[in-house]
Image (spheres, rainbow, N blue to C red):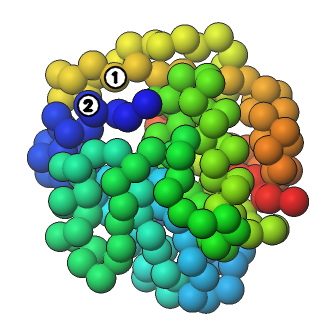
C-alpha cells in the first residue's frame, strides 16, 4: 500500500511542516547506537527534520518513501544521502544491514495487515539488537479513521499498545518504551532480539 496522498501535499508539507516534531525522539534513538551507524528512515518524506537530525548526530542515513514528490524534495534537502522509492512492507534492502530504523508518521497510514508486514520487513533488514522507533495510535479498532491535511483526505489505522507489543514480539522485537508525542500519536521504541 502506497500513500499517494503525500504526492498531493508535498509542496504544502515542505512550506508548512517545518517544526521539530520527532527530533527529541530521533536524537534519543541516535544516542543508543554508535556514531556512524547506518539508519533506515522509513517514510523519510522531505528529510526535514528527522533525517537531518540523525545526520547531524553523525549517522549514515538511507531514506525510504513511496512518494516521488517527497523524495525529490528529500534529494534537494539531503543531497548526499541516498533515498529509495518503495514501501515499508517490502523494504528493498538486504537482510541485517541497518543498525537502527525510524518510521515517524507512517505506520498509522497503513492498514492492520500492512502494519504487520511492515514490521516484519523492517525486522528483516535490521541487525540484531537494533532499535526501531515508530509512531502510531494506541487504540484497537481504529479502522480507516478519516482526517485531512491541506484538504487532502488521509486514512488512519491503529492497534492497542498490547497488540503492538504482540506484533513486535512475533517479529523478533521487544517493546522498550512508549510515550505520547506532541501531536496525536504514540511513540514506540522497540529493540530487535
* Most foreground residue, 118 or 165: 118
Tell me the distance, in whole angstroms, between the alpha carbons under discs 2 and 1.
7 Å
Q: Is residue 123 visible?
A: yes
Residue at x 56%, y 57% (from the top left corner): 102
Read off the residue under disc 1.
154
Instruction: Tell me the quadrant of the picture where the C terminus can be found.
Output: bottom right
Quadrant of the rendered structure where residue 131 is?
bottom right
In the image, taking residue 82 as reference, residue 174 lies left or right, namely right
Residue lying at 70% horizontally and 68% vertically, measured from the top left: 96
Q: Residue at x 18, y 59 (%)?
A: 72
**Residue occupied by mark 2:** 5
Using residue 182 as the reference point, say whether residue 122 is left or right of it. Answer: right
Of residue 183 and residue 136, the one placed in the foreground of this image is 136
Q: Position of residue 25 (x, y in %)?
A: 58, 60
Identify whether 24 is placed above or below 181.
Answer: below
Find numbered disc 2 in the image and state the secondary structure of the residue it sits on.
Answer: helix
Q: Position of residue 150 (x, y in %)?
A: 18, 29
Q: Residues within 10 Å of mark 1 (few under 14, many from 20)?
A: some
Query: For this view, does 160 lie left or right of residue 22?
Result: right
- Pointer 2 with pointer 1, Cβ within 8 A: yes
Sequence-earlier tag: 2 or 1: 2
Amino acid at each position: 500500500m502506497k500513500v499517494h496522498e503525500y504526492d498531493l501535499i508535498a509542496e504544502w508539507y515542505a512550506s508548512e511542516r517545518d517544526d521539530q516534531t520527532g527530533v527529541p525522539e530521533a536524537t534519543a534513538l541516535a544516542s543508543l547506537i554508535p556514531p556512524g551507524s547506518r539508519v533506515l528512515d522509513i517514510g523519510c518524506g522531505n528529510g526535514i527534520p528527522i533525517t537531518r537530525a540523525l545526520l547531524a548526530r553523525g549517522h549514515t542515513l538511507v531514506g525510504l518513501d513511496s512518494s516521488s514528490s517527497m523524495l525529490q524534495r528529500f534529494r534537494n534537502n539531503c543531497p548526499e544521502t541516498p533515498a529509495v522509492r518503495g514501501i515499508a512492507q517490502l523494504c528493498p534492502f538486504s537482510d541485517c544491514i541497518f543498525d537502527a530504523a525510524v518510521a515517524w508518521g507512517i505506520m498509522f497510514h497503513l492498514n492492520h495487515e500492512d502494519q504487520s508486514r511492515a514490521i516484519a520487513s523492517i525486522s528483516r533488514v535490521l541487525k540484531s539488537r537494533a532499535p526501531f522507533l515508530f509512531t502510531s495510535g494506541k487504540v484497537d479498532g481504529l479502522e480507516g479513521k478519516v482526517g485531512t491535511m491541506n484538504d487532502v483526505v488521509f486514512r488512519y489505522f491503529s492497534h492497542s499498545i498490547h497488540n503492538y507489543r504482540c506484533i513486535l514480539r512475533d517479529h523478533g522485537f521487544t517493546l522498550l518504551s512508549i510515550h505520547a508525542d506532541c501531536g496525536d500519536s504514540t511513540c514506540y521504541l522497540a529493540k530487535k532480539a
